Image (tube, rainbow, N blue to C red):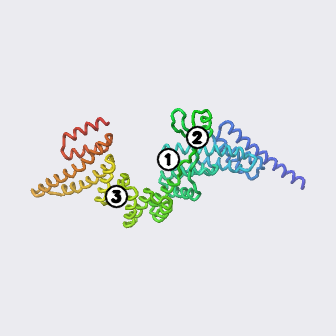
Amino acid sequence: MKTKILFAIAFAVTSMAFAQKKEVKAIEKAIKSGSYGEAKSLVGAADALLSQMDDKTKSKFMLLKAQAFLGVDNKNVADLTKAGEAFKALMGTKMESEAKTGLSNVVAALVNSAVQDQNTDQFSDAGAKLEKAYAFSDDNRDYQYYAASNYLNSKEYDKAAAIFEDLMAAGYTGQVTEYYAVNAASGEEKKFENKQERDIVVLAKEYVKPSEKLSESREGLITEYLISIYSFQDQNDKALAMLDTALEKKPNDVKLLTSKSNIYLKMDKKDEYRAIIEKVLQIDPNNAELHYNLGVTADQQGDDATAVKYYNKAIELDPSYANAYNNLGALVLRKDATFVDQMNSLGTSNADFDKYEALKVERKANIRKAVVYMEKVLELKPDNMEIANNLLNLYQVLEDTNKADAMKAKIDAMN
């Protein structure tokens, strides 16, 4: 009786092993024929037998599973994740070499698909794929950086901040060694893709003076991104703490100081805001862009007089600063709505008629002030359709037929 039981068990084990190998061979056959959909279905059925497989069969199955979900030109992040996980499970086994190659292919597929997503503004999908690429890479944190940048573009600020914070904690800079040499004939310096390519042309004496430089660090950008996220989410204390840390390294950095001043302004800490602005202007008094940005800040706060002062200073420093002229024009035109409301509120009496005419004169005088700025913008940016259309409308309000007709002809020519 005991012999019969042992025989039955042995027969069952043999039958099961045969079934497992049969399933594995079927998957292999489907992959070789390019039938990846069928292969994935067969993998699903064979997964139930995984715990009963011997080590050799299990390794073979995991490799085939990975290949089935990797497929050819597969862009599905769920499939690629399964492929990557299966390849990772083979690390440390006799199939480690195949696993490493497979993981490289998974990472390449994820990155290529992410690039396509970026090009079609599918930033969230690109971010998810690049996160997976990092998980399956050999700790290549560049993928993390680009994942966070995509999440920033998709306005998924929590995801972006978490990755940027991780990169900061890891001391990531993104710096790499770049290889340069000078063209022997032209004297122009050129950057090469790698050291080998550079060394070949130097050896051929086509290029001279080989040199190496570190690429620009991404640490500053990551700091800026995190400060922007914290500020946007009203995590002002975190933003200020990060700014203080950054300013310890660069105490006179105008960009960092301006960011700090804007946070103080948002927190209604006007004394702190003014103190920083005074310092910034001492550091870089002739920076037209700085004065323009200060004008924008004052403009947004409703402080028209201060905004005008800074816009005019920007123009004084850079007479071709079109945006400063444009914003001055917009500031002047802001009063136009008040004139229109007052004129529309009047009745039909003689007194109201006189008031209407007086307001009409005032309105036109105000518009003429704005037109001076807008005309300067169009002079500096002759192809700006928006400004051209705005001027056409203003000329029509001013009943200046000659200028209106000339502007209409210009717009028609631009179209």
Front of the two marks 2 and 3 = 2
Residue matched to label 3: 300
Give the residue type at disc 3: Gln
Disc 1 + disc 2, Cβ < 8 Å: no
Please give the name of the residue rendered at 28% of the width and 36% of the height, measured from the top-left corner.
Answer: 412
Q: Nearer the viewer, residue 186 or 312?
A: 186
- Asked if residue 229 is positioned above or below residue 41 in the image, the reply reads below
Q: Position of residue 410 (x, y in %)?
A: 27, 37
- Asked if residue 398 is positioned above or below residue 269 in the image, the reply reads above
Precedes in sequence: disc 2 or disc 3: 2
Disc 2 + disc 3, Cβ < 8 Å: no
Front of the two marks 1 and 2 = 2
Q: Which mark is residue 122?
A: 1
Front of the two marks 3 and 1 = 3
Q: In which quarter of the view is residue 413 placed?
A: top left
Farthest left residue in view? 350
Q: Residues within 10 Å of mark 2 (few under 14, many from 20)?
A: some
Position of the C terminus, as image quadrant, is top left
Give the residue type at disc 2: Pro
Please give the name of the residue rendered at 71% of the width and 50% of the height, measured from the top-left corner.
Answer: 91
- As helix, strand or loop, the secondary structure at mark 2 comes to strand
Q: Left of 231 or right of it: where is 408?
A: left
Please give the name of the residue rendered at 61% of the width and 37% of the height, measured from the top-left corner.
Answer: 197
Residue matched to label 2: 210
Q: Position of residue 175 (x, y in %)?
A: 56, 50
Q: Left of 243 or right of it: where is 346?
A: left
Position of the N terminus, as image quadrant, is bottom right
Give the residue type at disc 1: Gln
Q: Residues within 10 Å of mark 3 (few under 14, many from 20)?
A: few
